């Protein structure tokens, strides 16, 4: 009996000394496992006389239960301890304010394009597209730029290396200098498969070899084209006036048409909008109040599509006329949103974009900018 008591003390000490679950399991196997110490003692019972077997058997069973209970208790103590350690090291401070998420912004160019699409869609225009890499025909010749004419030098063109498979001036590849080339593609396509009316707008990248505060080698233009029977300069003036007043959300924005030359229109006009200069040098679009000077700035080129251009596209100028205009997107975005330097549009600076860009969820209404 005293042996059993001594064993109990010894085993209890071993169990308490097990400081992790793996060690405890080793103790369990060494005591209660198939070859464990208590199991071995149980096996000796068979050799005992009945009286001894009875008392020793009982005592061993009690010991076995007590040891099993001790192991269980130690096991839950160790598990709790492990959990406490985890809880202490993995605490979450839910009172901390969340780190601000970096949200993307819509670029002012994309925003402006969307606003223009909305305005022109409400007037029944659809969106046309054309390639950035153009040929001489679509960018110049079909638009009535005569060969060698100084008008070609109006736009500092990026020419591409000659393409051996396509010979001749007409096929010479270049980066389009304006979106007017899309007019040609548009009209040629329609003339092949049907007839006007054509009522399209087009947006896209354009390229000129130029770089300063108001010029970048790549910039964006929008182009508007309306061809139908009996289209007059009055339609051009009405459409453009409506567009700029809606775009700048100024009902009485002064709009002025000034005669100008573009080879692809006749007559051609540049369009100016009115503004006043504030005392601090900044400008404010709109009508000048009494006593203040009305100033004008040019925002786009326009005109009645030249008969030669219509002919070049397979449209009979005796039957159809139309107007076209083109404008720089950055320029009007700068004016509307007070962005001072054109070059910053393409610096890819996220701080600039966070400041001048638009939240993708609560953007201004596309048509009014409000
Ligand atoms: N393509 C001209 C430019 O880039 C702008 C322009 C002027 C477009 C008159 C037109 C137009 O459609 O009629 O300077």
Image: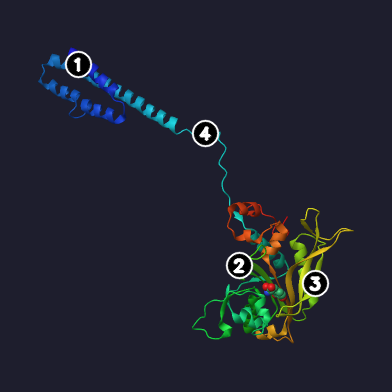
Determine the quadrant in which ligand 1 lies. bottom right
- Mark 2 highlights which residue? 218
Q: Which residue is mark 4?
A: 93
Asked whether the beta carbons under mark 4 and mark 3 sit within 8 Å of each other, the answer is no
- Horizontal side, residue 8 vs residue 147: left or right: left
Mark 4 or mark 3, earlier in chain: 4
Q: Nearer the viewer, residue 40 or 105?
A: 105
Task: Sort mark 4 into few (<14), some (14-19) or many (20+) by Cα contacts within 10 Å.
Answer: few
Nearer to us: label 1 or label 2:
2
Judged from the image, the secondary structure of the residue bearing numbered disc 2 is strand
At label 1, counting other C-alpha atoms closer than 10 Å, the crowd grade (few under 14, some 14-19, many 20 or more) is: some
Cα distance between the residues tagged 1 and 3 = 114 Å
- For mark 1, give the secondary structure: helix
Q: Quadrant of residue 256?
A: bottom right
**Alpha carbon separation for disc pair 4 and 3:** 65 Å
Q: Give the mark nearest the N terminus, 2 or 3.
A: 2
Q: State whether residue 7 is above or below residue 107.
A: above
Q: Which residue is mark 3?
A: 257
- Residue wearing tag 1: 4
User: Residue 138, relative to residue 108: is it above or below?
Assistant: below
Whether label 1 touches label 3, CB < 8 Å = no
Along the line of sight, which residue is nearer the eye, 311 or 149? 149
Which residue is at the far right? 290
Which label lies toward us, 1 or 3? 3
The residue at 21%/17% (across/down) is 7
Of discs 4 and 1, which sits in the foreground?
Answer: 4
Q: Is residue 230 above or below residue 351?
A: below
The answer to whether residue 22 of the structure is visible from this angle is: yes
In 3D space, how far apart are the residues under numbered discs 2 and 3 (Cα atoms)? 27 Å
Q: Are marks 4 and 2 in contact (CB under 8 Å)?
A: no
């Amino acid at each position: 009996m005293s042996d059993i008591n001594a064993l109990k003390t010894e085993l209890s000490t071993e169990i308490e000394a097990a400081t992790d679950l793996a060690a405890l399991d080793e103790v369990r196997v060494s005591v209660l496992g198939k070859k464990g110490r208590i199991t071995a003692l149980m096996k000796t019972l068979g050799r005992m006389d009945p009286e001894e077997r009875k008392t020793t058997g009982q005592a061993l069973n009690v010991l076995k239960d007590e040891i099993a209970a001790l192991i269980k208790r130690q096991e839950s103590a160790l598990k709790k301890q492990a959990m406490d350690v985890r809880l202490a090291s993995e605490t979450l401070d839910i009172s901390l304010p969340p780190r601000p998420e970096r949200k993307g912004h819509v670029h002012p160019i994309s925003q402006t394009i969307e606003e223009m699409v909305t305005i022109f869609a409400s007037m029944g225009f659809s969106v046309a597209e054309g390639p950035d890499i153009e040929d001489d025909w679509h960018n110049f010749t079909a638009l009535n730029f005569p060969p060698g004419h100084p008008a070609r030098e109006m736009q500092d063109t990026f020419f591409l290396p000659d393409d051996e498979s396509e010979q001749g001036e007409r096929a010479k590849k270049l980066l389009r200098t304006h979106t007017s080339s899309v007019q040609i593609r548009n009209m040629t396509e329609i003339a092949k498969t049907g007839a006007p009316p054509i009522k399209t707008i087009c947006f896209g990248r354009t390229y000129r070899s130029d770089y300063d505060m108001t010029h970048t080698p790549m910039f964006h233009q929008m182009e508007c084209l309306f061809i139908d029977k009996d289209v007059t300069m009055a339609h051009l003036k009405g459409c453009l006036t409506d567009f700029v007043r809606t775009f700048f959300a100024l009902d009485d924005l002064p709009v002025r048409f000034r005669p100008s030359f573009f080879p692809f229109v006749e007559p051609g006009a540049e369009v100016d909008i009115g503004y006043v200069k504030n005392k601090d040098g900044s400008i404010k679009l709109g009508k000048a109040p009494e006593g203040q000077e009305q100033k004008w700035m040019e925002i786009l080129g326009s005109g009645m599509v030249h008969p030669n251009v219509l002919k070049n596209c397979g449209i009979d100028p005796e039957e159809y006329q139309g107007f076209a205009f083109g404008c720089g997107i950055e320029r009007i975005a700068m004016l509307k949103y007070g962005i001072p330097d054109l070059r910053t549009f393409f610096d890819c600076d996220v701080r600039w974009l966070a400041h001048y860009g638009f939240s993708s969820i609560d953007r201004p209404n596309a048509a009014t900018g409000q």
